[in-house]
Image: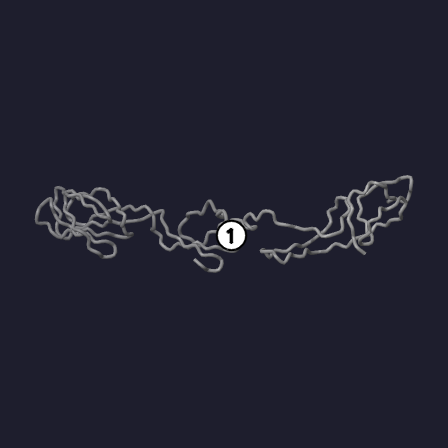
Amino acid sequence: MGVQARLNIDIRPFILAGNPVALRKDDQTIEQDAGRSAILASATLMAIKGFTLATTGTADGGNTGDGTVTVVSKLADGKSLIAGDYNLEVTGAGVDGRSAGSVTAGSNTGNGTVTALAIVAGELPKVGDWILTCTNATEGGTASGTNAFTGTGNGTSSAIVAGANAIVGDYIILCIDATVSGSEIFSVTDPDGVHLADLTVGVAYSNTHLGLTLTDGSTDFIVGDFWTVTMIIEHGGLFTLTDPDGVD
């Protein structure tokens, strides 16, 4: 037997109730011999055929995605089903069902946050956990320095200006020559122990690490007096993003 589907059959009413006086119409699927072309005659005896629903869909062999269709069922809307194959076709890929998800902080020291999380248009990122790891805490940060004096002289220091190559830690500015009053000479050493250009009291000092000016006081600096300039860098960080497969 072949199955032919006819929707909204209303040329002739079908008796679907036991009382012929109370005739009513309904949408039905009619089963007849395959290839039959004759028009059904009035008073033809018909029967309502029940159908067993498939519980899953069958994927086309040419699909790219590997998703499945499950829990096939008839809606409880009172309408009859039409026998045959129902095709479910993707008309818009969107982001392939992916969403940006949410961010969970690890056991971090910093209290910064990740915002504006989104999938780039046209990209299909891997599903799973992406790990954002800080690999350089000072990259792109804001540097600032404070100074403290140890010694005999009572000269002063201007505010510290941090340079582009400032290093986190203590810079030591040590008096090494007090021969000329008001023009004492100080050595400058960075936190890594590298000697930078010497500083002279009363002359503005500036390089890619830091800038400041030492001013002579009523009591001269002596050899061995020193300033400790502590450099810090805030609100920076270089991060590495690792995908769910462990690839950076």
Question: Where is the C terminus found, in terms of image quarters?
Answer: bottom left
Please provide percent x and percent y for residue 173.
19, 51
Question: Where is the N terminus found, in terms of image quarters?
Answer: bottom right
Please provide percent x and percent y for residue 183.
11, 45
Find disc 1 in the rendering and name its residue.
Answer: 124
Image point (48%, 55%), residue name:
130
Q: Is residue 240 left or right of residue 154?
A: right
Please provide percent x and percent y for residue 16.
86, 45
* Mark 1 nearby-residue class (10 Å; few <14, some 14–19, many ≥20): some
Q: Quadrant of residue 54?
A: bottom right
Residue at the outermost bottom position: 246
Give the color scheme: rainbow, by chain, secondary structure or one colour: one colour
Residue placed most toward the observer, 81 or 162: 81
Residue placed most toward the observer, 22 or 176: 22
Please provide percent x and percent y for residue 201.
14, 45
Q: Is residue 213 left or right of residue 42?
A: left
Residue placed most toward the observer, 1 or 98: 1
Image point (17%, 49%), residue name:
151
Identify the secondary structure beneath mark 1.
loop
How many marks overall? 1
Amino acid on which disc 1 is placed: Leu
